Image (tube, grey):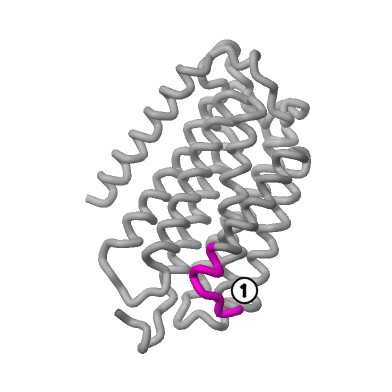
């Protein structure tokens, strides 16, 4: 049932996104181009005049939408003595969905506004990793943590708007900082957490980054193929998000907090 519902919801998001593209396109040249066009926006060759310029890179992004709905289902279904449920799991799932939709919009249009929404999702996700680690480390309340998350996202979005050329480095800095805080400071405070799960997600991210570099530099590139390194980057990114979710979900509540 969970797979069926999650698949149906992902399909609905795909159809809604396609309807939006039909409404705005397919003449994407009328919009300001994405800054990544200076380096050809990854290996996949744009299909001239098509509604979706990079189909492999675009539709592979829906994996994030699928895992996002999967996480949202787990936020409220099958209650367990886990610290990662309810609102915080819901927020994590929503950020994954935003990542997927934003990535579709970038690779479908190769426009500056598509790039904005693509990076927006990445910022939301990396900020979540950092703030959730800070919450566990410093014992912050949910209200304080949410306020900090909103503030961090506001700063990142403002920088994305004003200095879009810094998007990749800023994302990497926030994500790496979140990983360091999680492993060194937050992890010891998480009761019963399965650290290996975080390691699997980290490994997936490392392999994904290596493939991203090969694709972005065209060191490994078949422009007209549907088998794209950047699509594999998306798949491994989904794997990393899923293992992060399992890691967070493995944290148990203290006995006095159950129920």
Q: Quadrant of residue 62?
A: top left
> Percent position (x, y) of residue 246?
43, 65
Is 211 left, or right, of 235 in this rendering?
A: right
Does residue 137 lie above or below 14 as drawn?
below
Q: Residue furthest left?
A: 1
Q: Examine the residues drawn in magenta and state their main secondary structure.
A: helix
- From this viewpoint, is residue 225 visible? no
Does residue 107 lie above or below 169 as drawn?
above
Number of numbered markers:
1
For image coordinates 51% across by 25% down, the residue present is 55
Is 147 left, or right, of 9 in this rendering?
A: right
Q: Quadrant of residue 150?
A: bottom right
- From this viewpoint, is residue 48 visible? yes
The crowd level at tag 1 (other Cα within 10 Å; few <14, some 14-19, many 20+) is some
For image coordinates 77% across by 27% down, the residue present is 38
> Percent position (x, y) of residue 98?
50, 43
Q: Which residue is mark 1?
A: 183
Query: Was residue 235 drawn as part of the magenta stretch in this picture?
Result: no
Q: Helix or strand or loop: what does disc 1 sit on?
A: helix
Query: Was residue 144 drawn as part of the magenta stretch in this picture?
Result: yes
Does residue 201 lie above or below 256 as drawn?
above
User: Considering the image in quadrants, where does the C terminus appear?
Assistant: bottom left
For image coordinates 58% across by 60% down, the residue present is 149
Q: Which residues are magenta?
A: 138-146
Does residue 123 lie above or below 83 as drawn?
above
> Percent position (x, y) of residue 215?
67, 36
Q: Quadrant of residue 256?
A: bottom left
């Amino acid at each position: 049932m969970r797979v069926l519902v999650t698949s149906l919801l992902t399909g609905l998001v795909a159809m809604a996104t396609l309807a939006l593209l039909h409404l705005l396109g397919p003449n994407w040249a009328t919009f300001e181009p994405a800054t990544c066009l200076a380096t050809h926006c990854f290996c996949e060759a744009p299909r001239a005049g098509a509604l979706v310029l990079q189909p492999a890179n675009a539709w592979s992004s829906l994996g994030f939408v699928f895992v996002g709905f999967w996480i949202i289902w787990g936020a409220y279904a099958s209650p367990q003595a886990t610290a990662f449920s309810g609102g915080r799991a819901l927020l994590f799932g929503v950020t994954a969905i935003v990542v997927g939709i934003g990535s579709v919009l970038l690779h479908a249009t190769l426009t500056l506004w598509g790039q904005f929404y693509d990076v927006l999702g990445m910022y939301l996700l990396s900020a979540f990793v950092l703030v959730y680690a800070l919450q566990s480390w410093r014992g912050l309340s949910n209200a304080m943590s949410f306020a900090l998350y909103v503030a961090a996202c506001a700063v990142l979005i403002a920088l994305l708007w004003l200095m879009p050329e810094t998007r990749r480095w800023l994302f990497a800095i926030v994500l790496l900082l979140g990983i360091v805080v999680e492993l060194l400071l937050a992890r010891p405070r998480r009761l019963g957490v399965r650290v290996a799960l975080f390691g699997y997600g980290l490994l997936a991210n490392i392999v994904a980054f290596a493939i991203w570099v090969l694709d972005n530099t065209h060191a490994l590139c078949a422009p007209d193929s549907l088998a794209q390194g950047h699509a594999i980057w998306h798949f491994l990114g989904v794997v990393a998000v899923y293992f992060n979710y399992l890691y967070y979900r493995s944290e148990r509540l203290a006995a006095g907090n159950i129920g």
